[in-house]
Amino acid sequence: MTAIVKDTQTHNQLPQSLLQATEPIQDLLETASLYLHIPFCHTRCHYCDFNTFAGLLPLREPYVRALLHEIEMAGTMARHEDGRLRRSRTLFLGGGTPSLLSVDQITRILNACFQSFALDADAEITMEANPGTLNQEQLIGIRKAGINRLSMGAQSFDAELLKTLGRIHSPQEIVQAVDFARVAGFTSINIDFMFGLPGQTMQHWQETLKRALELRPEHLSLYSLIVEEGTPFQDWVNDGSITPGDEDLCADMYEYADELLRQAGYINYEISNWALPGHHSRHNLTYWQNLPYIGMGTGAASSFAGRRFSNEREPLDYIKLVKANQLPTVESEDVEQAQAMSETAFLGLRTAMGIHLPTFAARFGQPFSQFAGNRLQDVEKAGLLEYEDDWLRLSTRGRLLGNEVFLRLLPD
Ligand code: SF4
């Protein structure tokens, strides 16, 4: 999607909270954001390639018990040498469909995290939810348990398109879910929508955005459809029964959304993400700033203590490993300094803020210019990068050709 970005935003339009580091980088590197994966769904959506399973709902309780045990083991693994618990600034319950768990199960998971990690008093605690699986009582319960941000996969306000996607909810259920969430006291709600869908016209997209804005969510994530391998969508594209939106239409949809959302007061702080001031996702910024995180649950990935590792993907195998008191890690690699520098650079360039050069130098003990050497000379000359104060970011043209820049930042 980098090929279709139109950028009219300057640093002057970004809030200070996004431009100023809240804490020294060395302190942030001592934290770990937490991700917990809940791999259950009622049915598989036709485009989905996430590590999630339909038909396994009876496994929910054994899975939650295993997850509680993994949280305890991970908390011990992540402790400081002097025994202090690892500090966490954000926690994200994703999936899958975490809203298929009961309030009691969600409360137990959060309590386990509070016991095994030192969560900040004002930690951002997000739960993903499917609008077709929410009710008022449950939302009041999870708000009470400590969830303070909801992220809803709405995808479209068009009933036909929702059917094409294989989603189980109706457009009315999206509105109802947001109403329930507001009554339950949620003041930070993200809603995901998709564009470039088979059969989706510009008119459909405009209507979806209009109805989305009527709900005034604090955050919106807009993704273009990617046809993933092994999904029903891929089969249907191959046999010609569906055709996703073409690149030009997707570009027009993106530009329309960007303009509309900016006029409505949202800030496009990352390619696919818009937020009202103060409501950017702190958890997702952890990833884009390449800060440490620990993932728990099936298939969850971690980046912690100079290592990247991921968990067993199959729920039954995962449960077995954890029951045997083993951390369910199945893949692991050390992250060399050169790789960490590259990743920090290109993840930073995905954001509207770009790379904060003094922070980069403090983190890696060498200035960005030394790391980049003359690798960026030609893209700088071609006007793909621009400097503003202490920041380096992609220019408007650079965002159109982001991959040209990213390739040059790969380790030798
Ligand atoms: S609800 Fe989300 S995770 Fe579950 S199948 Fe649909 S897209 Fe995949």
Image (tube, rainbow, N blue to C red):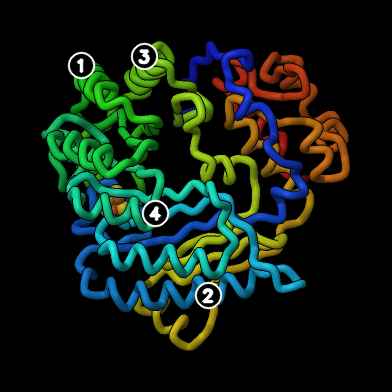
Q: Residue at x 43, y 63 (%)?
A: 110
Mark 3 in CB contact with mark 1 (< 8 angstroms): no
Spot occupied by residue 386 in the image (x, y as percentages of width and height): 71, 17
Q: Counting other residues with Cα less than 10 Å from the Cα at mark 2, is it few (<14), some (14-19), or many (20 or more)? A: some
Would residue 289 be found to the left or right of residue 213 on screen? right
The C terminus - image quarter: top right
Say which label, 3 or 2, has the lower sequence index: 2
User: Residue at (39%, 51%) from the top-left corner?
Assistant: 147
C-alpha separation, residue under disc 1 versus residue under disc 4: 31 Å
Spot occupied by residue 239 in the image (x, y as percentages of width and height): 20, 43
Q: Which mark is residue 260?
A: 3
Q: Earlier in the sequence, mark 2 or mark 4?
A: 2
What is the distance, in whole Å, between disc 3 and disc 4 at their CAs? 28 Å
Q: Amino acid at mark 2?
A: Glu
Residue furthest bottom in the image: 324
Which label belongs to residue 72? 2
* Secondary structure category for the residue under label 1: helix
Q: Which residue was labeled with disc 4?
A: 94
Q: Earlier in the sequence, mark 1 or mark 4?
A: 4
Q: Are dots 1 and 4 in contact, CB under 8 Å?
A: no
User: Which of disc 1 and disc 3 is earlier in sequence?
Assistant: 1
Q: Which mark is residue 203?
A: 1
**Foreground: 243 or 330?**
330
In the shown orientation, is residue 29 left or right of residue 98? right
Q: Earlier in the sequence, mark 3 or mark 4?
A: 4
